[in-house]
Image (tube, grey):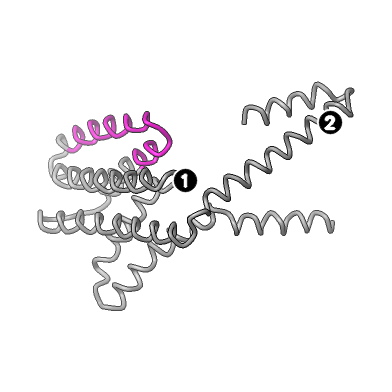
């Protein structure tokens, strides 16, 4: 029981120190802070669109080079703004809306073939289509304002992400190194058991292949 408790506490500690939890904290701060600030200054009506822009452009912020991270978020910002505007202007005519959704869905889905980061940018674009359908904007001015605020939200998230990367530049590297060492340790344990427990060779060989191809 004591060993299980220690294992649980250790796992919890590693999770709280991990890059995934840290990225979740960064996203939470980036979304909540504009809501708080704009509510304080009496301009809360603009805050939801900025928070939405922050949320839409966060998925592409994954481990990688700083250049690719910046480019990925900027591409995501442009894509979500463009998609939202197209859905807005075609929404009054149902046939045009269907054609626009079909073309956008196909074109955006093709972006995912360029890798994992690109697939997350594609996800942001598809999510922007869905969210734009749920937002009603009666005139061109309100449409442009909403799209502009989405862009501001995306740039705000990029700023927060760069600031967090400056404060903790090795967070992702340390997480990847930690995961690599953990998997290497488990792999070596299985290799050792292959020598010491020949009667369980078939079962251990299956584990060995699992770690080898993970």
Residue 116 is one of the magenta-drawn residues: yes
For image coordinates 68% across by 43% down, the residue present is 182
Number of disc labels = 2
Q: Which residues are magenta?
A: 97-123
Q: Nearer the viewer, residue 86 or 71?
A: 71
Question: Could you say which quadrant of the image residue 3 lies in?
Answer: bottom right
Position of 107 with respect to 201 (left or right) is left
Image quadrant for the N terminus? bottom right
Residue shown at the point (15%, 54%) measured from the top left? 143
The main secondary structure of the magenta stretch is helix
Q: Which residue is mark 1?
A: 63
Spatial separation of the CA atoms under disc 2 and disc 1:
34 Å
Mark 2 — residue? 193
Q: Is residue 10 above or below residue 123?
A: below
Note whether 8 is above or below 46 in the view shown. Answer: above
Looking at the picture, does residue 104 appear above or below residue 54?
above
Residue 143: within the magenta? no
Residue that appears at 58% across and 54% down: 18
**Residue 139 x %, y %:** 10, 55
State the residue in front, 41 or 18: 18
Return the residue found at the far left. 140
Picture coordinates of residue 4 (x, y %)? 80, 54
The spot of residue 20 in percent (x, y) is 53, 52
| Residue 109 lies in quadrant | top left
User: What residue do we see at 20% from left, 53% from top?
Assistant: 147
Mark toward the start of the polypeptide (2 vs 1): 1
Q: Residues within 10 Å of mark 2 (few under 14, many from 20)?
A: some
């Amino acid at each position: 029981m004591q060993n299980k408790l220690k294992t649980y506490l250790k796992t919890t500690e590693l999770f709280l120190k991990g890059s995934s939890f840290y990225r979740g904290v960064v996203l939470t701060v980036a979304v909540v802070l504009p809501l708080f600030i704009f509510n304080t200054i009496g301009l809360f009506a603009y805050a939801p669109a900025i928070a939405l822009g922050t949320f839409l452009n966060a998925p592409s912020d994954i481990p990688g080079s700083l250049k690719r991270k910046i480019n990925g978020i900027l591409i995501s910002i442009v894509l979500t703004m463009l998609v939202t505007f197209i859905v807005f202007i075609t929404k009054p005519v149902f046939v045009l809306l269907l054609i626009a959704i079909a073309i956008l869905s196909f074109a955006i889905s093709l972006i995912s073939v360029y890798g994992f980061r690109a697939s997350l940018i594609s996800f942001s674009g598809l999510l922007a289509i869905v969210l734009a359908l749920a937002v009603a904007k009666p005139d061109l001015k309100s449409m442009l304002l909403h799209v502009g605020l989405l862009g501001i939200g995306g740039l705000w998230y990029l700023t927060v992400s760069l600031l967090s990367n400056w404060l903790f530049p090795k967070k992702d590297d340390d997480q990847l190194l930690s995961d690599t060492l953990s998997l290497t340790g488990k792999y070596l344990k299985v290799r050792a058991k292959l020598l010491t427990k020949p009667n369980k060779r078939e079962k251990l060989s299956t584990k060995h292949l699992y770690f080898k191809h993970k």
